[in-house]
Amino acid sequence: MSAEALHFVDEHLSRFRDELYDFLRIPSISAKPEYAQDTRRAAEWLAERLKDAGLHVDIHDTPGHPVVLGRWDEAGPDAPTVLIYGHYDVQPPEPLEEWDSPPFEPTERDGRVYARGTADDKGQLYMHVKALEAWLATEGRLPVNVLLLAEGEEEVGSEHLVPFVAEHAEELACDHVVISDSNMFAEGMPSVLFSLRGLAYFEIHLTGARSDLHSGQFGGTVANPGNALARILASLHDDHGRVAVEGFYDDVADWDEETRDRIRALPFDEDAYRDELEVSTLSGEAGYSSLERLWIRPTCDVNGILCGYTGEGAKTVLPNRAMAKVSFRLVPDQTPERVGELLRAHVERVVPAGVRAEVRTLHGGRPWRADLDGRLVDAATEALEEAFGTAPVLQGEGGSIPIVSDFEEQLDASALLVGFALPGCNLHAPNEWFPLENFETGIGALVRLYGKLGS
Ligand code: BES
Ligand code: MN
Ligand code: MN
């Protein structure tokens, strides 16, 4: 343990914050081509801060946004190597009018900093950078060998990171992967993740007649892709909230009773959850609690629909095209590839006559389940308990981080997911925020974590 490093964090906290705010001012929106220069600027900015901290840094160009790779390998061959992963890209901020302060002008209110990317993931990634700086500035060394890999395409599916990791597997060789891109269970309740769901994302395109038609002149004689799309989408679930795509549950592995007990033991108030979301009742797969539905059961959701006339007033049109964006959250041992095959077969089966259907794959990522045995989770448990004054709970997570299972597989290492955001932080939504207290306490926890992994 390094008391000096912890003290350094205290002393330099306001500078750390100011630096983070500079990072947050760069609109690194990976999804929008017009922000490609800004996204690169965020990579370059991060690379400079890693150099300032004392790491060797390369920026690797990819066909998409660059990968930043920092390295410090002087802890010696007996010390473990930790690969820290995070992403410097952010989600688009729209709808802008719903932000109480500008998304790329970090603003403090009530112990929170509001800006796009504070929680997901710039703030959490930067906490690692500052924990490393604290060690290097006070001890002149790190307790572990470190690789810090930050990508700029997580929010668009990590398309180029997957081949990057495969091609650089030797250079990225490590013992542990540590990621802070998730939440604590609740305020004051740190957590370690036991799972992440995977993702399989598609567009369903339907085409009918040669063009839009007058719905009186032709309606009733040719198939309407809008009607057809409604039928297809309605066929994706049964009356018990289960996904009705044939074969969908075949690869779903049973969870052990220990995990289900662990979930049941967490203090989760279903009524408060329902009220906070302003819905009259919760809904989902029959036979499971909300936390189970979120963490250990797969789902299917329509993410968007495009069809026909949606402007003001009435237009009697029989549209000739319709499109829906549909995604599935996956659990072990489902794969996005298999779910794609099943969805295609399902759509072929149910598409009404007279309409052509095409299912396009957008992106996907495999689910992940943690290996909870071993030094990594033990060290995290101790570090979090010392920093937060309470031992972490184990929890699952409904969101996805596509690269995690690739890391484990390609690098033969196990991953630790320890996040410091809170469930209410508005990830991907207007008014994203991060608790400043967790910024401070979390850096302390990370300083300790590295120390423990090195000893
Ligand atoms: N950090 C999130 C994943 C996450 C969300 C973890 C909530 C824990 C709690 C990540 O940046 C993310 O948003 N992932 C996307 C997947 C990606 C392929 C677009 C997601 O889950 O939708
Ligand atoms: Mn993220
Ligand atoms: Mn995200």
Image (spheres, helix red, strand yellow):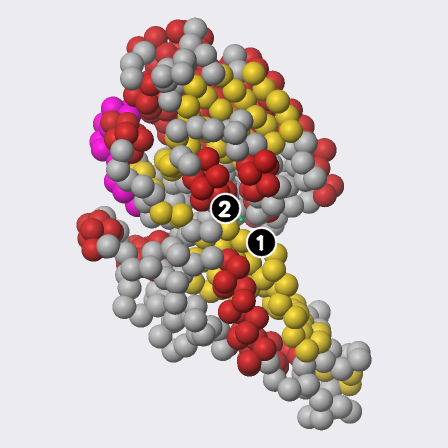
The C terminus: image quadrant: top left
Q: Residue 199's x, y, as percent?
A: 49, 55
| Secondary element type, mark 1 | strand
Q: Residue 215's x, y, as percent?
A: 73, 86
Badge 1 density bin: few <14, some 14–19, many ≥20, Cα 10 Å: some
Q: Residue at x 62, y 22 (%)?
A: 58
Q: Which residues are magenta?
A: 383-395
Residue 127 visible in image? no
Q: Which residue is mark 1?
A: 363
**The quarter of the displayed image where residue 48 is located:** top right
Q: Amino acid at mark 2?
A: Pro
Which of the labelled discs sits on residue 402, or is there none?
A: 2
Q: Are marks 2 and 1 in contact (CB under 8 Å)?
A: yes
Identify the mark nearer the N-term, 2 or 1: 1
The N terminus: image quadrant: top left
Nearer to me, 104 or 87: 87
Q: Residue at x 53, y 27 (%)?
A: 171
Residue at mark 2 to residue at mark 1: CA–CA distance: 9 Å
Q: Is residue 450 above or below residue 113?
A: above
Q: Is residue 129 left or right of residue 394?
A: right
Residue 445 visible in image? yes
Q: Is residue 276 left or right of residue 33?
A: left
How many callouts does the rendering have?
2
- Is the CB of the residue bearing disc 1 within 8 angstroms of ligand 1? yes
- Is the CB of the residue bearing disc 2 within 8 angstroms of ligand 1? yes
Can residue 384 be found in the magenta stretch? yes
Q: Residue 411's x, y, as percent?
A: 46, 35
Q: Residue 357's x, y, as percent?
A: 65, 75
Can residue 402 be found in the magenta stretch? no
Q: Amino acid at mark 1?
A: His
Badge 2 density bin: few <14, some 14–19, many ≥20, Cα 10 Å: many
| Secondary element type, mark 2 | loop
